[in-house]
Image (tube, rainbow, N blue to C red):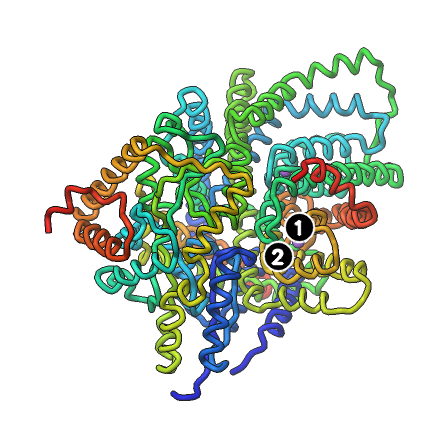
Amino acid sequence: MIVDPVMIGILGSVSVFILIFLGMHIAFAMMFVGFIGLYILCAFEPAVAATASTMWEVASFYPYTVIPLFVIMGSLAGSSGMTRDLYTSFDKWTRKVPGGLAVATIGACGAFAAVSGSSVATAAAMGTVALPEMERFKYDPKLSTGSVAAGGTLGFLIPPGIGFVVYGMLTEQSIGKLLISGVLPGLLLAGAYASICVLWAVLYPQAAPRDVEPVTWKEKLIALNGVKEPLFIFLFVIGGIYTGFFTPDEAGAIGATILLIVAAVKRKLTWPALFGSLTGSIRISVMVLMLVAGANVFSTFMALSTIPVQAANWVTSFDVSRYVILAMIILIYVILGCFLDAISMMVLTLPVVFPIVLALHFDPIWFGVVAVLMMEAGLITPPMGLNLFTVAGVAKGVRLETIIKGTAPFLGAIIVVAVILTIYPNIALVLPKMMGK
Amino acid sequence: AEGGTIHLKFSTWHPPASREVTTVWTPMLEELKKRSNGRITYTLYAGGALGKGPEHFDIVKKGLSDMGYFTATWTPGRFPMTDVLSLAAWVDGKELATDIGNAMNKEILNKEFQDVKVLELNGCIQAFLWTTKPVRSLEDLKGMKIRSPGGMQTAYIKALGAEPVFMPLGDVYMAMDTGTIDGLVTCPPLILAFKLHEVAKHAVKATFGCVSEGVVMNQKTWDKTPPDLQKIIMEVVGNPFATTHGLGKKTYAQMMEELKAKGANIYDLPPDQEAKWFKEFQEATKKWAADLEKQGHPAKEAVIMYNKIAEEHGTKCVAFPPEWAQKK
Amino acid sequence: MYTRIRDVIQTATRVLGYVGMVFIFPMMLLTSADATYRDLFSRTIPGAFELSSLMLSILVLLGLAYAQQMRDHVRVTFLVERLPEKLGTIVTIITTLMSMSIVAILCWQGVVLSLENTQVSDMLRIPQWPFRMLVAVGAFFLLLEFFFDLVDSVRRLAE
Ligand code: NA
Ligand code: NA
């Protein structure tokens, strides 16, 4: 029997959507359809073997150790009372800004992104820290979860980030220049995210309730006291990374160890709190990595279906203005990003897309920034959006639908930033140009 | 079977724009198509689209891909004897590495590959030590974390007093950029493919050998292939580097120049230091052979055979313990 | 009888999860010790990387079924909830059977791939197959969790 791989691929993508809407667990829906697809396009034996070995590969992949470690760090910070003090102080200082705590969360995500190359780790750590606090201040879960899921994507654009490394490798561009090119667009995107938080709070004041009671300078200064400890630990961890004492991967472990000691010394380490931190950590890790495994099986199926290559070929075959083609490339990336993890998406499409981009006289470094922006978008688009799921794991009792709705405006911000970068490419290029040859 | 056609899925973990894909795998697959008058067609999956590097043997064995390039060293313990192709030797072209690997396969290594069709086996081009800070002596290496491709190279790194760390090549750039590791041992084409010269600017030109690799084909697909096409496949893929002239001696010399032009600082080890390093390698070889002999593998015989074949091909195995040469 | 067996199995699932999560401590301490040791004594702990990956695999695979019991595996429910009750239950039964089929494959192939595996870790030469077997263990308990959900759905349909 001759089967058209593209047709099977399209049927598979539609089936995933249907199964997810019918309430099937997302990880298993992707794994199931991916398996059936491999079976049809290949054979039974390779399909079953690939599925089971993917599960193993994901579960034993060293870089993923950051997930349990950062989650436990975040939740120990919570149970030691540290984040409570931190957000109380944030509140006193940012009370004049609508949605101030969400803005502060974006800022903290940006700072975290500057040391972490992983968006999921950023979302996991910041989620455990920020979500309970925003809940305490009665923020709309849409706004709070949306800002954390989106804020986490900054981990890709603000260097270091794995997205640029993959792009550089696939396109023979200097990774050093690429990483530097992400700095200003990263700040721009963080600014855009913050503006969305402010705008949201202005349009829907009940989403971010504000205490109108003015805060005196004295109170503000006293509140700073609560920042002392978390700030010390934050500076210790970040300083340790910058001075090369330890690596971002190690930071989660070291931060968690310090917090464990601090909590024990302050006698805030109760058994229930420790148990809660541990179970939280394993449950989120399992949930996220099960999704990664499902998505990886599905990505292999997509690769065999040749859809990404065909889609890239198709968009780039039109004889229209180069900006129309660019817009179509971005659209294709948004669609593919719904199904593929960021890295597979680039591996499968860039060999086709990149030569076209060069032929259209776009700057290769600049396009790298656009590509990484699209990878970020993929992290928050359903059904396969790792940051959405990470936040869903951290935010107990918030429905996935709510989180998806909450991130939608931030997805808009990514597109707006892509447009701004197209109009002013120098935002991306000025720093790498200064680096010279 | 005359007139039958076949479609091959070829999978490799090399990035799509890398020298391996553009100058070896694509031309090789095109050559198959040409020599078979279009009866062999193909789809190339590069960049690990069908699975990460270490999974490539299983990808082919189980049939997810029909043909693929696998790295035996990345699955330690699985092809214990094939590690012999990774012994440190001055091999400066992959066509040469393949001639040696194929000869070893015919003699002794084929026992480890019963469940696939081996089309070719090769060691890799000589690999050097690339570090973020300059290394001049064994003292400098103490306590450094060095990414190892596995196998013999792990033993060598340990023997030199550094700490070997295994991780996929794709993660190495970030790991060096952030200081997780201080360097790596790999061959020049992969330095270029993964842009590692940007972070590891200092190389020490002492051969470490490199990983053992090869092209394998799914047994069922091979059995289904018409005999005349099987013949074409063996001719073309039997030594893909000779067929395509990709990654041969000439390219290798060019790559070294390219790396220098890109600012890599390549240091020639003075003879007395070099002798010290290679002495450590020879000790590692002895230990490796002794461990395998204990498990019932004829490892010493394989090392002696490798040395002999390497010398016949005009190259030198620096990890060969000289005292083994006398005993015939 | 069914309730008794179910309770026992679900307790076992939780215990597995608790065993898995304890591995966070050695992971945390090993990584911290490795970094400290390197900074202070220019020495590293051999195989810290390998041990961390193996511990991650224990944690994740032993936790597979526990996370399902705690309803952590994400899903979208708004459409199923709006369907007529009977239809919604039938849909849930079908999707649960699909999940079970893929988990059964993980379980079966977990055993097969583990038994045929001869790989060891690079530094410490730790055999990989026992850890790979955990894929089957985790999937087996996950399968049972799904089975209990299935029984619940079937009972609801029967009512
Ligand atoms: Na980052
Ligand atoms: Na997505």
Which residue is label 1 attached to?
A: A375
Q: Residue furthest bottom?
A: B2
Residue at 54% across / 43% down in the picture? Answer: B261
> Residue A345: which disc?
2
Q: Quarter-wise, where is residue A267 in the image?
A: top right
Residue A124 versus residue B101: which sits nearer the camera? B101
Mark 1 vs ligand 2: CB below 8 Å: no
Q: How many marks?
A: 2
Q: Could you tell me residue B1's position as x and y percent? A: 38, 87
Residue type at mark 1 is Met
Q: Secondary structure at mark 2?
A: helix
Q: Could you tell me residue B171's position as x and y percent? A: 51, 44
Give the mark, 1 or 2, whose residue is nearer the N terminus: 2
Residue C51 versus residue B260: which sits nearer the camera? B260
> Mark 1 and mark 2: span between their CA atoms?
8 Å
Q: Give left or right: position of A202 versus C4.
A: right
Q: Quarter-wise, where is residue A266 in the image?
A: top right
Q: Tell me if label 1 and label 2 are in contact, CB under 8 Å.
A: yes
Q: Is residue C22 visible?
A: yes
Q: Give left or right: position of A210 versus B90.
A: right
Residue type at mark 2 is Met
B189 relative to B107, above or below: above
Mark 2 residue crowding within 10 angstroms, few (<14) / some (14–19) / many (20+) = many
B193 relative to A15, above or below: above
Q: Quarter-wise, where is residue A222 in the image?
A: top right
Chain under label 1?
A
